[in-house]
Image (cartoon, rainbow, N blue to C red):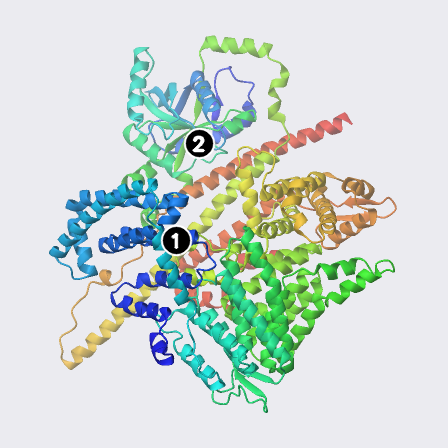
Amino acid sequence: MSRFFTTGSDSESESSLSGEELVTKPVGGNYGKQPLLLSEDEEDTKRVVRSAKDKRFEELTNLIRTIRNAMKIRDVTKCLEEFELLGKAYGKAKSIVDKEGVPRFYIRILADLEDYLNELWEDKEGKQTALASRFLKKAPTTDEDKKAAEKKREDKAKKKHDRKSKRLDEEEEDNEGGEWERVRGGVPLVKEKPKMFAKGTEITHAVVIKKLNEILQARGKKGTDRAAQIELLQLLVQIAAENNLGEGVIVKIKFNIIASLYDYNPNLATYMKPEMWGKCLDCINELMDILFANPNIFVGENILEESENLHNADQPLRVRGCILTLVERMDEEFTKIMQNTDPHSQEYVEHLKDEAQVCAIIERVQRYLEEKGTTEEVCRIYLLRILHTYYKFDYKAHQRQLTPPEGSSKSEQDQAENEGEDSAVLMERLCKYIYAKDRTDRIRTCAILCHIYHHALHSRWYQARDLMLMSHLQDNIQHADPPVQILYNRTMVQLGICAFRQGLTKDAHNALLDIQSSGRAKELLGQGLLLRSLQERNQEQEKVERRRQVPFHLHINLELLECVYLVSAMLLEIPYMAAHESDARRRMISKQFHHQLRVGERQPLLGPPESMREHVVAASKAMKMGDWKTCHSFIINEKMNGKVWDLFPEADKVRTMLVRKIQEESLRTYLFTYSSVYDSISMETLSDMFELDLPTVHSIISKMIINEELMASLDQPTQTVVMHRTEPTAQQNLALQLAEKLGSLVENNERVFDHKQGTYGGYFRDQKDGYRKNEGYMRRGGYRQQQSQTAY
Amino acid sequence: MASRKEGTGSTATSSSSTAGAAGKGKGKGGSGDSAVKQVQIDGLVVLKIIKHYQEEGQGTEVVQGVLLGLVVEDRLEITNCFPFPQHTEDDADFDEVQYQMEMMRSLRHVNIDHLHVGWYQSTYYGSFVTRALLDSQFSYQHAIEESVVLIYDPIKTAQGSLSLKAYRLTPKLMEVCKEKDFSPEALKKANITFEYMFEEVPIVIKNSHLINVLMWELEKKSAVADKHELLSLASSNHLGKNLQLLMDRVDEMSQDIVKYNTYMRNTSKQQQQKHQYQQRRQQENMQRQSRGEPPLPEEDLSKLFKPPQPPARMDSLLIAGQINTYCQNIKEFTAQNLGKLFMAQALQEYNN
């Protein structure tokens, strides 16, 4: 920067001095100090805005922070240096201190320093070698240096005591600080406006662009003051605007301002400061204004620097720069800001308000690109739009659907309609364009997933399911990159929840099984990191994973998710368990559900259920007995409403669906469990017991009979179910199992016998193909043949 | 099964159901040529064992204790017993031997038989044929030749007939256990099968005349309803449990056989390899000879082909024994039950 100032302008300015300071400091080997000075510098330019008190105190706290850091790493030299600076700063702040009283942090640091020093002295004997080695590592200091350092420390301690007493004195008399303030006051005025051009220079395009290039050359270099650069660029815009240099130049500079705003953060993990963010949004908006106002400006990243046309008004203006990339970057920054804000704070809400602005910008860019951009660009901006639309529930459209337009509310309706198209229509339009035009697989995949998600969110289950099946994403999603996989997981989960709302428990269960069975739902949905795997990944991986997290406002409620999963599992598993009670080969439908049941059983004392899981377990137990009323009261009550059910957009509909499901499945369970004690049951009784209407009961029982789950027949005239009693009893079942086991035992035994025969060669052949083996058995004798005959 | 009752004390508890079995047990017991031909138990001991189980044992938990008595000719008379204390993990330093010695010394002071003649154990649905029982009975029999183990089955007893059996290890099994060689060959050589692992010794319960008199008197006073468990027709639970246990054992047996099978296969495979190796060696040697070179040096074949570790067959023997017990249990139980059912049917018809 200093070079720029010496070459680009002959006027001497304060900031160039500070720039030189910047350059020289790192030579001393103290990189840590740099950012501090930078911020100080920035402060100086803004002095007019801040109150003097804040500024002074901030200066002090900054110094104190560095001192503390130095203390931590036992860098005594640095400590001393900073301490001296602190002393000076305190002197400057004198007048304020006199007004406000001595700041507590100042006293604290003094006390801490004293303790620290005493400790150091005491420790000295023991730690000498360690300290020495540390010093040796830092810089080639020898013992003498160390002694000097110790002397310094002594001095410092003394000084500190002096200062303390002085400070006490100063509290009483307050007549010293005034002149300090006055002297300092003069400086910022000089610093305030870094001069761009020499006075009297004629401002032309060439000059401005030359300047711009000069500024840009410093970009990305070590030691460049990024804040100042932004400042300069903004000044340049002003100058350009004042001198009517035309829109081309302004657009060009604006592009660069935004780029340097993005550059402001040195690494990927940190996020933009709110003020920067605001500036960035404003800037993009202004840029868009210009672009819309001047349709003759062409913007593109493929325009070469040389072929740019910034001021020749006769031809269309051509500017290098890509608005799309800027917007994409902006979106990323927004995500980063959301990721890094505590989601339960007011701040988050504040940031979230910006989302509307982001959306508006994206929309504007979309409109712009629809006119001028290539299809590829359009696809990209569409995807961006989709990503900002898919997770939002469209209440307006929902409302419109619920209340068909009537005469009375027509005007309102029209108004609502005018406000914007349904998000469903919008999604449809955008996605279809992408399906048709996109050539990169990733954008299409994302668009499909978002589309499915949107469908699912709005309870359009069949569309969502069909789209999911048609896309064949389930087969090859594991090859996608993690963010897309996270999106896929989110979509599957949303699909499952949608199925559940429609009363399709089986589909819901299947969709959620993958996510829930792993027990890592949180991680898979990108809604948080698991502590468990913290050891497995290193710092780098953790950073990457942290960046993948979905911002809080996109989160899917995990408790709701688990509840939906468990309830669907319950509705499937309990009748199944009842039907296959004594079946040895019974498999589990849902491992997780069984796990919860077992946890519930292990409890020595069963209180009334507290958590969602306990509720479901209690309900399952009730359902096992066919007691649907208790089951109902466990699943749907105040607590569960608050925790889960009220979170659905159509809570009441879901609840009625659920009640009905519970009734039906309870009826099935009841029939499975107790059919053996009945000779016949009247369907009317059943319909009374389960408060279902007769046709439903009839259809359920018929279905069970057809599926051969219930050995019974319907007696139409009397409306009763007559049991056949052909199911084996528990003993018979056991005996059957035993027979099976004995069969395998015999088989195994015969193999041993084969060995005894000494035909081990033959045995191996037998093992290789089943057909030959069978033959071998046949050959060997009547016993086996007999058995196989009886088996058929 | 072999609880033949002498004396008149407990005639009420079905002598019919055990009489047939007793003869069989006796026959089997007679086949072994061991020192003890008969076990005579005092009523006191029976009651003490029952009491011990009722106080401390529940479910699958077993209770154990020491039998005291003396040997008279070929008859082992058990006159007293005392339980092993149930020890928990808290008092890990509890010395059982110390406790037993102390107990016996104390009993001696009060003039009770203090000779250690065996031990007793309760069982859960007859599942007592285990390694632990085998090991401890072996050590008992090794130290005191006449010692027996009494197996008390509380569940059967609860159904109405006292189930108390005395077992000893057969001399053959003693031999094998002494050798501590459970390889297939050794067991084959010893010619041991699951049927000849344990021998049952017939039991006689003896009471003093005074007690018999008391029993007579009590029987006259006791109400009829007390004896109804015997006629209970609800049998499915018991049968189901037995089947379940039997099934578990069969599973274990299957696994064991598979293990044995793999072993056999491995051995035969190795045999083949060994054979091939030898042949190759021979051929090469012949070639060398024809070329006039010295033959290859002899190598230790056993080092080259380490025979696979043979699986211990004791476990499968025990399992087989256990399966046998279960089967007999089930057989006995179903036979009795069938009788009961027929009787119930007849009664029903008569009533109609």
Q: Nearer the viewer, residue B184 or A497?
A: A497
Q: Is residue A46 toward the left or the right of residue A718 in the image?
A: left
Q: Nearer the viewer, residue A32 or A234?
A: A234
- Identify the residue at image location x=80%, y=60%: A412
**Which disc is residue B27 wearing?**
2
Whether residue A774 can be seen here: no
Secondary structure of residue under mark 1: helix
User: At which x and y percent is residue A714?
Assistant: 81, 48
In the drawing, what numbered circle is on residue A56? 1
Between A469 and B193, the one lying in front of the other is A469
- Label 2: how many Cα within 10 Å (few below 14, some 14–19, many 20+): some
Left or right of A690, for residue B230 = left
Q: Mark yes or no: residue B125 visible.
A: yes
User: Label 2 near label 1: C-beta < 8 Å?
Assistant: no
How far separated are the C-alphas under marks 1 and 2?
110 Å
SS at badge 2 = helix
| Label annotation for residue A687 | none
